[in-house]
Amino acid sequence: MIAGKSVPVNIGTFVNDMVTFRTEDDILTLLIHLGYVSYDYDNKIIKIPNEEVRTELAKRL
């Protein structure tokens, strides 16, 4: 995603809290809820919506 590509995600396993994370998809779904990534419902993919967010996420990896 840092390179601007979309990533598939399964949002169906998310438990809707900020404590329980069982899979990578749970973490990615939380990022959708927080607004850091955008979700394409039809294609079930996410991407980082803008350069500012992409730059900040890259600094923390």
Image: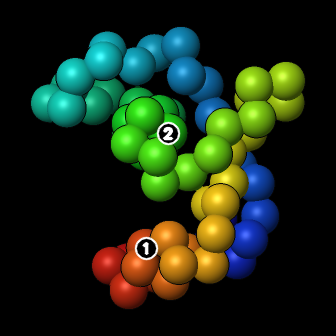
Kind of residue sitting beneath label 1: Leu
Residue sitting at 53 percent across and 78 percent down?
A: 52
- Pick the quarter of the image with the C terminus: bottom left
| Picture layout, residue 17 above or below residue 61 | above
Judge whether 1 appears above or below 40 on screen. below
- In the rendering, at what x and y percent does residue 3 appear? 70, 77
Q: Residues within 10 Å of mark 2 (few under 14, many from 20)?
A: some
Q: Residue furthest right?
A: 42
Q: In which image quadrant can residue 60 be found?
A: bottom left
Distance CA(mark 2)–CA(mark 1): 14 Å
Q: Is residue 19 above or below residue 55?
A: above
Q: Report the residue at 68% width, 54% height from top.
A: 47
Q: Earlier in the sequence, mark 2 or mark 1?
A: 2
Identify which residue is drawn at 38% across, 86% down. 59
Instruction: Find residue 22 and name its label.
Output: none
Residue identified by numbered label 2: 32
Report x, y in % for residue 27.
Answer: 38, 40
Please say whether residue 23 is visible from this viewpoint.
no
Q: Is residue 31 visible?
A: yes
Kind of residue at badge 2: Ile
Q: How is the image coloured?
A: rainbow
For the image, the number of numbered tags is 2
Q: In what element is the residue under mark 1? A: helix
In percent of width and height, residue 41 lies at: 75, 25
Query: Is residue 4 toward the left or the right of residue 2 in the image?
Result: right
Instruction: Out of 10 and 46, give the one closest to the viewer.
Output: 46
Quadrant for the N terminus, please. bottom right
Please name the residue that numbered disc 1 is placed on: 57
Q: Which residue appears at 47% of the width and 46% of the height?
A: 35
Q: Is residue 36 above or below residue 60?
A: above
